[in-house]
Image (cartoon, rainbow, N blue to C red):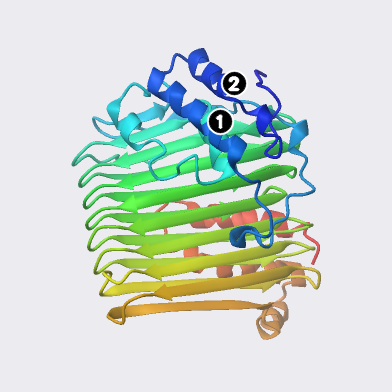
Amino acid sequence: MTSLHPVHPNAPEAITPEVAAAEAREHGEPDWLAMRRADAARAHASLPAPTPALRPWRYTDLTRLDLATFEAAAARLHVTGAPADGYAGSLAAASDREIVRTHLGSLLPATEAKFLAANAALWRGGVLVHLPRHSAASEPIVVTLDASALAQALVYPRVLIVAEERSEATVVLRLRSGDAPLVVMGAIEVIGGPASRVRLLIDESWGAATSDFSWVRARLDRDADLQVAALAFGGALFKQTVEVELAGEGATSGIRAVALGDADQHFDFVTLQDHVAPSTTSIVEVKAALAGAARSVYYGITRVAAAATGADADQANYNLLLSGAAKADSDPVLEILTADIVRCGHHATVGPVDEDALFYLESRGLDRRSALQLLVAGFFHSIVGELPFAGLADELDARVTAKLATAAL
């Protein structure tokens, strides 16, 4: 394993401009990128570490995560599929392209947060998906990040998706790790040009000792459509922030996620639907089913600007508690600055499985565990059924069945 200096967000001297610039030189990156990496290292030194005093981190305390014992390393990246006349591959290898210089870091600036600064300074490999005007990828572009060979490692995935006018693609990110301790600080940026269509599936199957802190941020132009979905099954701690700016008239977005927890797993979802332009539409639906002493947190904001007349937005978070020790917190927020809207609503529930439904299934010969497996799979299907990914429903059923076969109920 090739490693850099050990990194700790509370020890800014660990990420220095010299270390960041050396990362650029090692991979033959252009001078502009070396300068940005160095600037990100400087930002990292000045930014505070996240604490529960920051609203998006209210329920996720990092004091027990000793990052001083981890070293930055590169996971294995494998990319299959490519758009017609486009590009899907190494971000570092494409760093001499003007499109990378223009868009990399434009949505997730290093100056915004300490973990983002660390990513901007030390990301390795990375992936660029470029969809030229009027292009379409006939098959899904599958990006596999495999960290199963790493231990006590810090991994900084970076993905940039640029979809130009009337382009279309499905991108699947498959995230894998072993059982050794691992920390992931990821950044995904999506530029949606006019009338583009992007489907992004984040399939998380981290090992039991992985902590993932990742951001997805998108900006959509006129009539663009982005659908983001996340499947969260593994890891010790999974904190994902997904934010979409509907900047062009008629833009549409969907943010959907399912989480299945057991033992002391911790899931923390933050979403933002930012309606800037008129006649924009967004939906958020996050569902969690929690066994053992698992916990799920949801904090979502729907923001409608004064100019975003005709906005249609809905936000929902539903949680099933499968054991007495499981816990869920839900905090949906609306910030509406115009009265001229179609709809802006939010819904949240936290509760146990319907005992009548369980009794019905048990009366048909299923034991309690088998009945719960069936009910949880059905609970998730309302989300999966909305996603255009072939075979996803069957895959989800199998994973729910396998995890609940041994979960503490």
How many numbered markers are drawn? 2
Residue 115 coordinates in the image, percent (x, y)? 59, 42
Q: Which numbered tag is attached to residue 41?
A: 1
Left or right of residue 360: residue 384: left
The answer to whether 59 is drawn above or below residue 202 in the figure is below
The residue identified by callout 2 is 19
Return the residue found at the far front.
46
Which of disc 1 and disc 2 is earlier in sequence?
A: 2
Left or right of residue 263: residue 273: left
Q: Which numbered tag is attached to residue 206?
A: none
Q: What residue type is labelled 2?
A: Val
Residue 107 coordinates in the image, percent (x, y)? 40, 45
Q: Is mark 1 on a helix, strand or loop?
A: helix
Q: How far apart are marks 2 and 1 (CA)?
A: 8 Å
Circle 2: is it few (<14), some (14-19), or many (20+) Cα within 10 Å? some
The quarter of the image holding the N terminus is: top right
Residue drawn at (60%, 62%) of the image: 55
Residue drawn at (28%, 27%) of the image: 98
The answer to whether 225 is drawn above or below residue 72 in the figure is below
Q: Is residue 242 visible?
A: yes
Where residue 104 sits, quadrant-wise, is top left
Residue 10 coordinates in the image, percent (x, y)? 71, 39
Q: What element carries label 2?
A: helix
Mark 2 and mark 1 residues within 8 Å of each other at the beta carbon: yes
